[in-house]
Image (cartoon, rainbow, N blue to C red):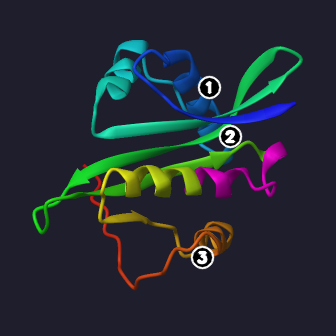
Amino acid sequence: MSINYQKLTNQDLPLLKELIQIFEVVFEMEDFVLPNDTHLQSLLDNESMIFWVVMLEEHKTKKVIGGLRGYILPSVYYASSEMYLYDLGVHLNFQRKGIGTKLMENLKEYSKNLGYKELFVQADLEDEHAIDFYKKTGGKAADVIHFSYEL
């Protein structure tokens, strides 16, 4: 059994679909309907979005067991960009084995190598597991209030 971390390219639509199905379970998304392939392909083609997957290879078969989605945000305050981590999830059977931590390390290293100034993520106050995870991986909490507008 081996575990590999891979940044998706625009040729990885099947892997993106597997990742989204992991997110559906981990984030307990009720009544979720997977968007069509055209939409998902447009996300892979979008250079301001990145996806990483964690692949489990066992007995010559590979499957996605986790991953993340991030956005590259150009800054108006400095000549660099920032990385916004929007989703990070690991299949329930593989949590607490260092996989999420390794994903964060990969994303931090990737962002640093591209000269990005900051990587940030939000966590719901009631999601103690996520808050503990982000603190454990070196994140520093900021007192902010997130506002949402239903459209």
Instruction: Say left or right for 138 vs 145.
Output: right
- The earlier-in-sequence mark between 3 and 1 is 1
Contact check, label 1 and label 2, Cβ < 8 Å: no
- The earlier-in-sequence mark between 1 and 2 is 1
Instruction: Say left or right for 145 vs 80.
Output: right
Q: Name the mark on residue 25.
A: 2
- Give amino acid for label 1: Glu
Which range of residues does the magenta coloring cover?
93-104
Contact check, label 3 and label 1, Cβ < 8 Å: no
Magenta segment, prevailing SS (helix, strand or loop): helix
- The earlier-in-sequence mark between 2 and 3 is 2
Q: Residue furthest left?
A: 76
Q: Name the mark on residue 135.
A: 3
Secondary structure of the residue carrying numbered label 2: helix
Q: CA gap, disc 3 to disc 1?
A: 28 Å
In this rendering, the answer to whether 105 lies above or below 92 is below
